[in-house]
Amino acid sequence: MKQDSRMAGNSVNLPHATRRRSTLAFKFLIPFVLVLSVSVIAVTQYFQSISYFLRPLWDTPPKPFSRIPHYYAPNMSMDQLCQLHGWGILSFPRRVFDAVLFSNELDILEIRYHELFPYVDRFVILEANATFTGIPKSLTFFENLNRFAFASSKIVYDMLPIGDLDPDSRRMPFLVEAGHRRALNNLLKRSGIAVGDVLIMADADEIPSPETVQLLKWCDGIPPIMHLELKNYMYSFEFHVDQNSWRTTAHVFTERTKYQHSRQTDLMLADAGWHCSFCFREIKEFAFKMKAYSHADRVKHDIFLNPDRIQRVICNGDNIFDMLPEEYTFSDLFKKMGRIPRSASAVHLPSYLIRNADSYRFLLPGGCLRPG
């Protein structure tokens, strides 16, 4: 009888114990599901930031460039300057062709052409009627030819007509950009460039210095291809980011030379000019480029295009896409996090910019305010 009583007691208590375990499991499951859901949302929302922060763990830095020292002092002859670089001097200068894809960087292009006009033989420029992301655009350069009348004898211009793009093109802007660069190759063939000429490949806001172009023009024995190291600026010449702009290249032209904007050699001439990114006169130009260029996917929220926000970003030296720096070591990452330090120096900048400072105050220290 006692045994029967114990068995009966167990049969009564067993469902209760099971219910307790089920309740406990459910209580633990709720926070687990909540944590998992929040984690998935966070990773989805901030994947790019997490990826950039952890980049030193998953990515390998590219091979360092072999930097060619750059020598210059006023009133030195080209013979002396070429010798300092270990090169000879030519009896006659090479022709220099400057080739760019143009979007809407009107002011910075005007500075570029004025700065390089005495040294460049042909300015080759291609403009499309739509952006890399498929947004229709006006022919800004063509509509402002009067501003470039001083260089009209040297300009080789063409317009790339783009009809209705395939919807996928908006999701593959880098492929569209590659098509623009192929079209520029065709324009170069019509520009009169010949074997032995120098071809500078750059974006419109990547400006080689006159001293650099003079070396390319006069020195015998320069490398057949070399990158040009440019001082990297953001929004204006008040915000100096670093020295790490390297995509501009100088080529001694051959039949096999093709326009590219990627790494092509390990050689790079040091301190060879300036790269002023997002250096626009008006707020609307910032918003247009943010939507137009190949990295338009960085515009994660509509608020990014708000004029008041853009103005604050410009004057504070913040990242316009609210992104972490793209660096390969935690040391460099932490060093560049936060705002770009302001510079009060307007020394060693394009001379045309300084001589016409009243027209370009927005590119100089203290000129961060832009018209809306």
Image: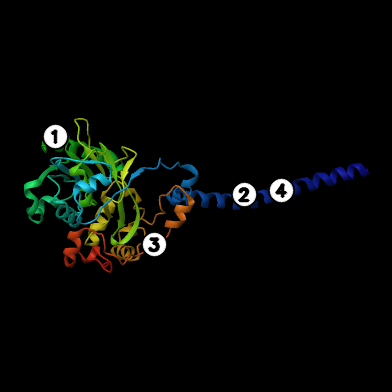
Q: Quadrant of residue 219?
A: top left
Quadrant, the N terminus: top right
Q: Name the N-terminal-most of marks 2 and 4.
A: 4
Q: Which residue is mark 2?
A: 29
> In the rendering, which numbered label is found on residue 339?
3
x and y, in percent, of residue 169 in the image: 27, 40
> Could you classify mark 3 by the number of other residues whose Cα lies within 10 Å: few (under 14), some (14-19), or many (20 or more)?
few
What distance separates the C-alpha of mark 2 from that of mark 3?
42 Å
x and y, in percent, of residue 40 in the image: 50, 48
Depth order, front residue of 64/172: 64
Relative placement, left or right, of 300 versus 73 is right
Q: Nearer the viewer, mark 1 or mark 2?
A: 1
Q: Secondary structure at mark 3?
A: loop
Amino acid marked by disc 4 = Arg
As displayed, is residue 95 above or below residue 243?
A: above
What distance separates the C-alpha of mark 3 from that of mark 1?
45 Å
Q: Name the N-terminal-most of marks 1 and 2.
A: 2
Q: Which residue is mark 4?
A: 21
Q: Which residue is mark 1?
A: 194
Q: Nearer the viewer, mark 2 or mark 4?
A: 2
Mark 3 and mark 4 in contact? Answer it, CB < 8 Å: no
Q: Name the N-terminal-most of marks 3 and 4.
A: 4
Relative placement, left or right, of 369 versus 336 is left
Amino acid marked by disc 2 = Leu
